[in-house]
């Protein structure tokens, strides 16, 4: 544990209070204006949220995975756009540097990522390379001591605010697949970088994505994470376990909120002369959601403990991501059902959450990609019996 129990409990409690007192009342405004107020971003920086996963020697809180899961469940109780604002700094925007960066790269970037002074974005996806991430076409060609980057990245979260992009680009041949991909730390202000127009998304208004276009962008060789070519994919895979547990915890937190909203609505809404909470068919929906929420919570907390113990968790991290993100989709669907027609009206937050949580099944590896990862581990680790 990075924090003693009392300090952790206090931090969890302060995030819980902040979510309820400050963020939930702002949800509607943020969705309508498609913007998080700047003072809220400043407050989240002040609370240390941008640096929860960055080691304390670089100014972060250095939380263990279990501690991060506890905090992110609390953040999941409100609109996911607030978490998205610091999510890239906590996840792949910083963890590649934490795990594989050179001492100079750590010194240069981690302290600023930890405070939120610098926003890190992760640029992997391309128009023709999504799930098949090893097929990226963006190229990084050696030119003396430098590399020249060319290519287009798609749906890049926080790109409009980013000060630094972790760019996955091909230094090897197409035939080398993932082995020919390297990770670069690219200053967003470099000449040759431009942004596409903001994507109009189904949900998560207030979180922004767009294309990032690289045209003959010259970066020095020391921009290569870890200083080694062809390691980019290995770095990405290492940080993915953490990211998948993070999204699972977020899904669990949102499921809790949706259940609370559903119970509250069902206890107030009357039909046939009584609260709809008294109808057993409504109770069944609530009970199913609570059961699935509890299963997801237990899963992600157990996998986080196992991560902290240094055990191999890739299969379980994918199982958590698959189950928890699909689970919150079902919970959101039931929440709309419990609300009846009101569930389809944007005045009620379940309508917004229904759209917001749809993303969890798509990014950081779709549900199908998680299934493939789980099956790959199962088959590889199978003990073949002679019979
Ligand atoms: C709001 C948002 C934010 C995002 N943020 C980022 C970001 O910050 N950085 C970044 O790099 N990317 C980001 N992404 C991209 C995201 O990670 C990809 O969209 C996702 O990985 C899926 O890739 P794709 O869209 O190309 O879908 P595809 O890979 O084209 O998949 C389409 C469908 O085919 C299925 N499929 C594909 N391959 C297989 C297979 N082998 N077996 C079975 N089914 C398969 C998929 O599961 C899916 O159902 C973001 C996307 C969104 C929408």
Image: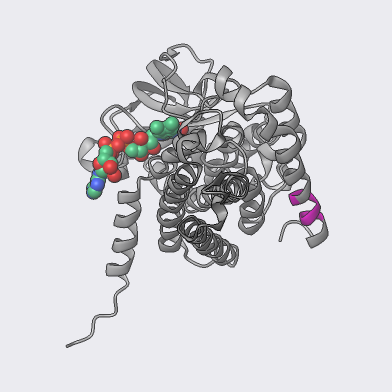
The reply, left or right, for residue 73 in relation to residue 236 is right
Observer-nearest residue: 91 or 362?
362
Residue 299 versus residue 106 in the image, above or below: below
Q: Can you give x and y, in whole percent of width and height, for residue 7 in the image?
A: 81, 55
State yes or no: residue 11 in magenta. yes
At horizontal 72% and vertical 40% (from top left) the residue drawn is 20
Q: Point out the stretch of residues depicted in magenta.
A: 7-12
How is the structure coloured here?
one colour
Residue 259 forms part of the magenta stretch: no
Q: In this rendering, would 180 be left or right of 253?
A: left
On-image quarter of the C terminus: bottom left
Whether residue 123 appears in this view of the structure is: no
Quick check: can you spot residue 261? yes
Q: Determine whether 336 is above or below 319 in the image.
A: above
Q: Among all residues in the image, which is located at the extreme left?
A: 387
Image quadrant of ligand 1 equals top left
Residue 66, image x, y percentages: 63, 59
Q: Give above or below for 301 relative to 342.
A: below
Q: How far across and how far down the image is residue 131, in percent?
A: 30, 41
The part of the image, by quadrant, that contains residue 133 is top left
Q: Residue at x 62, y 36 (%)?
A: 104
User: Horizontal and vertical percent for residue 111?
Assistant: 69, 35
Q: Main secondary structure of the magenta part?
A: helix
Residue sitting at 57 percent across and 38 percent down?
A: 87
Work out which residue is located at the far front of the displayed protein and give it: 273
* Foreground pick, 179 / 136: 136
Tell me the quadrant of the picture where the N terminus can be found.
Answer: bottom right
Count of labels in the image: 0
């Amino acid at each position: 544990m990075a924090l003693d129990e009392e300090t952790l409990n206090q931090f969890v409690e302060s995030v819980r209070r902040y979510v309820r007192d400050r963020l939930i009342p702002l949800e509607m405004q943020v969705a309508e204006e498609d913007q998080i107020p700047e003072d809220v971003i400043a407050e989240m920086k002040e609370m240390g949220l941008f640096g929860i996963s960055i080691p304390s020697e670089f100014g972060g809180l250095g939380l263990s995975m279990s501690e991060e899961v506890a905090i992110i469940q609390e953040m999941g109780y409100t609109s996911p756009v607030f978490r998205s604002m610091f999510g890239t700094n906590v996840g792949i925007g910083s963890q590649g540097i934490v795990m594989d960066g050179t001492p100079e790269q750590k010194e240069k970037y981690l302290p600023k990522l930890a405070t939120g002074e610098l926003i890190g974005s992760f640029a992997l996806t391309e128009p023709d390379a999504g799930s098949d991430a090893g097929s990226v076409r963006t190229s990084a060609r050696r030119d003396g001591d430098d590399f020249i980057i060319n290519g287009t990245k798609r749906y890049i979260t926080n790109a409009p605010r980013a000060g630094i992009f972790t760019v996955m680009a091909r230094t090897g041949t197409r035939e080398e697949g993932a082995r020919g991909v390297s990770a670069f730390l690219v200053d967003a202000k470099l000449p040759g970088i431009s942004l596409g127009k903001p994507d109009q998304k189904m949900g998560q208004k207030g979180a922004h994505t767009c294309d990032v276009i690289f045209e003959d962008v010259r970066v020095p060789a020391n921009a290569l994470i870890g200083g080694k070519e062809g390691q980019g994919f290995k770095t990405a895979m290492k940080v993915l376990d953490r990211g998948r547990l993070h999204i699972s915890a977020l899904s669990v937190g949102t499921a809790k909120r949706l259940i609370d909203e559903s119970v509250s609505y069902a206890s107030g809404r009357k039909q046939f002369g009584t609260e709809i909470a008294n109808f057993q068919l409504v109770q069944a929906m609530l009970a199913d959601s609570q059961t699935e929420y509890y299963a997801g919570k237990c899963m992600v907390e157990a996998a986080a403990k196992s991560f902290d113990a240094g055990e191999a968790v890739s299969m379980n991290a994918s199982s958590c991501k698959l189950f928890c993100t699909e689970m919150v989709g079902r919970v959101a669907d039931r929440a709309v059902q419990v609300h009846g027609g009101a569930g389809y009206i944007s005045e009620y937050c379940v309508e917004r959450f229904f759209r917001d949580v749809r993303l969890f099944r798509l990014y950081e590896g779709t549900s199908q990609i998680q299934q493939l990862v789980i099956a790959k581990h199962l088959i590889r680790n199978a003990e073949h019996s002679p019979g």
